[in-house]
Image: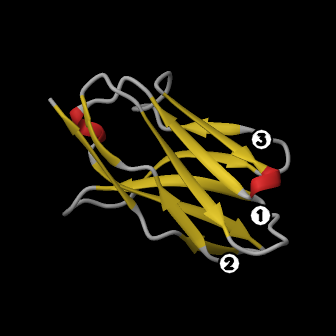
């Protein structure tokens, strides 16, 4: 499984971005997918997760009400709609898939929020 994250960039505080994470392969049916983020010198933290089949979502308290996770099973793609961005959201965002008991990571996409 190969995951490709995209959609990062530079945005002003209060702005929006949408991240995408696309999986390669014809058959892709993970148990769940998730977004994590990491700031240099800090541990990677969970941002949001979604179950692939049902679409149940969870969010970190810091992003609740601002971020929305979704997935398009036909496109093997997960999204993270990020609204009302804050400077503290600046990080490299990684996507992860949980499949057959294993974790698969994407390469990360940088989000920079200026104040």
Residue 65 place in picture, x, y as percent: 50, 21
Residue 2 place in picture, x, y as percent: 62, 76
Residue 60 place in picture, x, y as percent: 48, 38
95 on left or right of 71: left
* Residue 26 image-quadrant placement: bottom right
* Residue 13 image-quadrant placement: top left
Figure quadrant of the C terminus: top left
Residue in front for this viewpoint, 4 or 102: 4
Disc with the residue nearer the chain's start (2 vs 3): 2
Secondary structure of the residue carrying tag 2 is loop
Residue drawn at 75 percent across, 55 percent down: 75
Residue in front for this viewpoint, 81 or 36: 81
The alpha-carbon separation of the residues under discs 2 and 1 comes to 10 Å
Return the residue at label 1. 30
Do the numbered discs 1 and 3 sit on residues whose CB atoms are within 8 Å? no
Residue 7, compared with residue 61, is above or below; it is: below
The tag on residue 55 is: 3
16 on left or right of 29: left
Return the residue at label 2. 1
Residue 92 place in picture, x, y as percent: 33, 57
The alpha-carbon separation of the residues under discs 1 and 3 comes to 12 Å
The residue mark sitting in front, 2 or 1, is: 2
27 on left or right of 49: right
60 on left or right of 113: right
Residue drawn at 41 percent across, 64 percent down: 108
Do the numbered discs 2 and 1 sit on residues whose CB atoms are within 8 Å? yes
Secondary structure of the residue carrying tag 1 is loop
- Mark 3, other Cα within 10 Å: few <14 / some 14–19 / many ≥20: some
Residue 9, compared with residue 82, is above or below; it is: below
Secondary structure of the residue carrying tag 3 is loop
């Amino acid at each position: 499984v190969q995951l490709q994250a995209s959609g990062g960039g530079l945005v002003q505080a209060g702005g929006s971005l949408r991240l995408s994470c696309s999986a390669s392969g014809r058959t892709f049916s993970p148990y769940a997918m998730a977004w994590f983020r990491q700031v240099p010198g800090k541990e990677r933290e969970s941002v949001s997760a979604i179950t692939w089949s049902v679409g149940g979502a969870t969010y970190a308290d810091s992003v609740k009400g601002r971020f929305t996770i979704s997935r398009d099973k036909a496109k093997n793609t997960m999204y993270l709609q990020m609204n009302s961005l804050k400077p503290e959201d600046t990080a490299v965002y990684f996507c992860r898939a949980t499949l057959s008991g294993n974790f698969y990571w994407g390469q990360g996409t940088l989000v920079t929020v200026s104040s």
